Image (tube, helix red, strand yellow):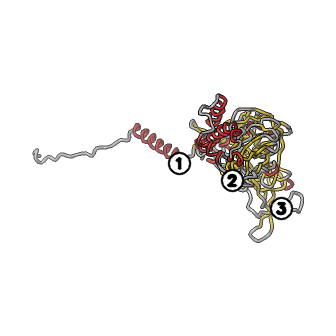
Amino acid sequence: MSSSERKQIKHKKQYHLNAGVLIFGAIFVYILFVLYAYQHTTHLTGYEVTMGSLAVDCAYRGVAVRHEELVSINDVGYINYYAKENEHVSKGGLVYSVDESGTLSRMIEDGRMVSGVLSDEDLKELKNELVSSSFSYDDKNFKHIYGIKDSIKSTIRRLASVSALASLKSLSGNAAANHVNMGYSPDPGVVIYSTDGLESLKSGEVNADILDEEKHEKTDLTDGRLVGDGDTAFKIVTDENWSIVIPADEALKETIGDDSYVKVRFVENDYESWGKVNFLENEDGLYLELAFTNSMITFASERYIDVELELSESKGLKVPNSAIVKMEFYLIPEDYLTVGTNEAGGFIRRTYLEDGSESTEFVAADVYNNVDGMLYIDTSVFNSGDVIIKPDSADTYTVKDRDTLTGVYNMNKGYADFTNIEIINSNTEYSIVSSKSKYDLQVYDYIVLDGDGVNDNDFVTETDTGINIK
């Protein structure tokens, strides 16, 4: 056979499976699966329950209740004040004058009756007012700055009025002097140059409406304004005994307990005093009255006051507020609880066979709490309207009533198991809870940190990054 007749025969290349390729492929598929599972898994963090203490968040803003008296004007004209606000005046002490013609007011405005140089005492008074105003400044309530401005202007004008008062004698024989009428204090007390409509407020009358500051804005009684017969000249506080009423709840009442006095810190100036405790309850809710026998003059011109109650620390099981959830349960009388063949607790439920005949079945159920003989049972166990039978009796009970418990999700068993808690006290981050029964949370239990991210009976597993729900 010639070379030209020879045919070159090509053989197909054979491929052999490589063990390394198989292993790499398996690892790659596994990585893809893990990444997919990670993206579709809710990741939670666990928290171990320990004994701890808690500084209770006890800051409140309350309303001041005092013995206040509004003093009316019996003249018409322009009013000028001489007594300093927040200072005591005696009975019959000079507080203001009313200038019928306006001559005195114009002379004060023109400065013709006022020395051009303030005394050291006057300068000190203005400085103190500026310092006090700087401490009360609030970025969120800028309109307060206008009140500060008006207050300082009023102080300057009052100083001018005092200077003018010293010159009133020179008006003797002057026609203008005959039109200036003096106003005196009817009782001894502290003079206030503002009103807010709450002068006759009693402690027991405090409600949510009273605590709404926007509904009771302060009206300043300024110098130099035109007044008429019956208008308010000033306000006088006639008693050193006063009180602050703050909103309260049962937790605060339980914390204070039978204490008759509680230590109070006034936020504005860090002043501390002991307030006598009196809880008040009306249709609007629960309130706490703190009664004082001192420091009234310091806050006499303020209606709404920030205070902190210096309470003892609460001790117990400490849990984060983020772990706390609420869950609804069926209520079933404890007399209907029985034990099944496997010694599990449960109930006997009435059922019906296909032929319509009546029968029964045992339904295992965990008890989450027992309050006054009523057991709290998971709503997934029964349907509303199910009928259960009391053991060794013909009595029946229709499942329908519900109630809510506060608790956390315990993960000791590998799944989210709702556990009842009783909160003693709490602040913005943590709560102190008690452990009184076998249904409650126990020390060293492991709970889900974010309770809203899990449902009851979800299976959970711990990982390096937290907890995964299956």
The three-letter amino acid code for the residue at tag 3 is: Tyr
Q: Label 1 near label 3: C-beta < 8 Å?
A: no
Q: Secondary structure at mark 1?
A: loop
The three-letter amino acid code for the residue at tag 2 is: Lys
Mark found first going from the N terminus, 2 or 1: 1
For image coordinates 53% across by 48% down, the residue present is: 40
The three-letter amino acid code for the residue at tag 1 is: His
Residue 22, horizontal then vertical, whole percent: 42, 40
Mark 2–mark 1 distance (CA, rounded to whole Å): 51 Å
Residue highlighted by disc 2 = 215
Mark 3–mark 1 distance (CA, rounded to whole Å): 43 Å
Please tell me which residue lies in front, 117 or 221.
117
Mark 2–mark 3 distance (CA, rounded to whole Å): 52 Å
Please tell me which residue lies in front, 344 or 387.
387
397 lies left or right of 158: right
Judge whether residue 154 can be spotted in this image. yes
Q: Secondary structure at mark 3?
A: strand
Q: Nearer the viewer, mark 2 or mark 3?
A: 2
Q: Secondary structure at mark 2?
A: helix
197 lies left or right of 260: left
Residue highlighted by disc 1 = 40
| Vertical arrangement, residue 443 with respect to residue 459, above or below | above
Residue highlighted by disc 3 = 397
Few, some or many residues within 10 Å of mark 2 (<14, 14–19, 20+): few
Residue 277 position by quadrant: top right
Residue 170, horizontal then vertical, whole percent: 69, 38
Total count of labels: 3
